[in-house]
Image (tube, coloured by chain):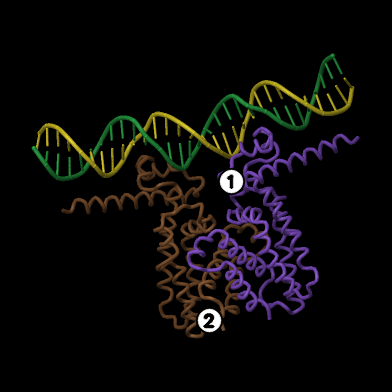
Chain colours: A purple, B brown, C yellow, D green
Amino acid sequence: MGIPERKEREKERRRQEIIDAAEKVFFRQGFDRASMDQVAEEAELSKGTLYLYFKSKEDLHWAIAERGMQILKESIRQSVVGTKTGAEKLMAIGLCFIGFSEKYRDYFLSLLFFEGKNLKKLNLSRDQIYEAFHGDSPIMILQQTIEEGMSDGSIRTGLPAASLTHTLWAQTLGVLQVIQNKKEVFDLFGIDRKSLILSHIEILKNGLIQ
Amino acid sequence: MGIPERKEREKERRRQEIIDAAEKVFFRQGFDRASMDQVAEEAELSKGTLYLYFKSKEDLHWAIAERGMQILKESIRQSVVGTKTGAEKLMAIGLCFIGFSEKYRDYFLSLLFFEGKNLKKLNLSRDQIYEAFHGDSPIMILQQTIEEGMSDGSIRTGLPAASLTHTLWAQTLGVLQVIQNKKEVFDLFGIDRKSLILSHIEILKNGLIQ
DNA sequence: ATCATAAAATGACTGCCGGTCATTTCATGA
DNA sequence: TCATGAAATGACCGGCAGTCATTTTATGAT
């Protein structure tokens, strides 16, 4: 009885097609300017159909951000091969994250979008929250790395690993966010964006690593 | 001939009254949910009048954020009295900023709102950009402090003061943003929000200050 | 007082958009 | 060929940012 399975696959495929279309429209126009009618046209579906697969425009945007998360996670996984200490791993992850923000700028902006939203106002499903903050999410990989570094002595102890993890993540996100959003200011001030990243790394190095 | 002057004052007062009304509505409902009709009703004016004083809803929101900036600036100014070294000043400013984010939560959220927006898409006037990033803005006070600390030897040199300033600002903002937006996650993980700030300070201390 | 003029204020109106739902189309198995 | 439920449709709704022709008000001149 393969028909239910085929239906299931087709449903999932349609879902992905809608996300594909939404990506094109959202990435081209920005989330605010883009309309669901445009997404529907790009997907060659009626608007009503979109709402059979996603409960809101924001929910559809979240699906895009989840793709970004997947890419980031995979990149991080690959970035740590060949590193030895936790500190080395940490540096690799950081550089990987920075690279991601440049190479996959659009996905990164989607992540930033949700980072700037109050979680409570987002009313996500349990699954969605779990997916984003537990298990094998980038932030959890980071925490494991920090714990590893504390064990092998390459990372300063004395602070709870969990707190340190979220702080580190937040700091880095803050720097990357500013770089994305305030380009014009830096051009005006004659500040090289690379030097912001350099400063960031320098601060972390001497602050985190013994 | 005092009439033009009086008119000017009344115009400015009306402007402030509109901002007052907008604050009430925006702070109560959040910027997205609040409508210009509600602001008009709160101000006891017609909606059309609002648009004689502000060119868009966002522009009105910006005016609120500017009030926040003023408060922050004044707080910072007061926080550094009695400090000696640049490093001490820096710590005072940081704690002041954190205090501001708690005491004036609504204003702080307005600042965050614009921090999360792309500057290019904001089409602000030259005056508005100048006001926010030049002169005696918080960020410039920070930069002067860092330069002072580099001179008196209390802050590590080797990085351009301007880059360091913006990096520091961005990191701190990132941490405060996450604390505001992801409360539920931290409750879930059993992470105290204070400990994030502690981690942040600890990282900066050992990374910035000799 | 009266009137002309310009500034200030009004609110009905427009266009757009997220989201809904009664109706239609389609695939499947009997 | 037909009955059934799933999938898709698109006309429609309510709400909102922003506009503009019209009205109201303040002022200075006559």
Taking depth in this image into account, of A25 and A131 the one nearest to the observer is: A25
On the same chain, marks 2 and 1? The answer is no
Res B73 quadrant in image? bottom left
Q: Chain of mark 2?
A: B
- Outermost residue on the right side: it is A1
- Crowding near pointer 2: few (<14 within 10 Å), some, many (20+)? many
Residue B62 is marked as none
- Residue at 67 percent of width and 67 percent of height: A165
- Residue at 44 percent of width and 57 percent of height: B65
State which quarter of the image contains the N terminus of chain A: top right
Where is residue B179? Give x, y as percent.
58, 62
For the residue marked with disc 1, what is the amino acid?
A: Gln
Where is residue A119? Give x, y as percent.
61, 53
State which quarter of the image contains the C terminus of chain A: bottom right
CA distance separating discs 2 and 1: 44 Å
Residue A29 is marked as 1
Seen in the picture, residue B174 relative to A87 is either above or below; the reply is above
- Residue at 61 percent of width and 39 percent of height: A36
Seen in the picture, residue B67 relative to B36 is either above or below; the reply is below
Element class at badge 2: loop
Taking depth in this image into account, of B109 and A85 the one nearest to the observer is: A85
Where is residue A75? Give x, y as percent.
74, 61
Res D24 quadrant in image? top left
For the residue marked with disc 2, what is the amino acid?
A: Ile
The residue singled out by tag 2 in the image is B155
Seen in the picture, residue B83 relative to D28 is either above or below; the reply is below
Where is residue A156? Give x, y as percent.
68, 78
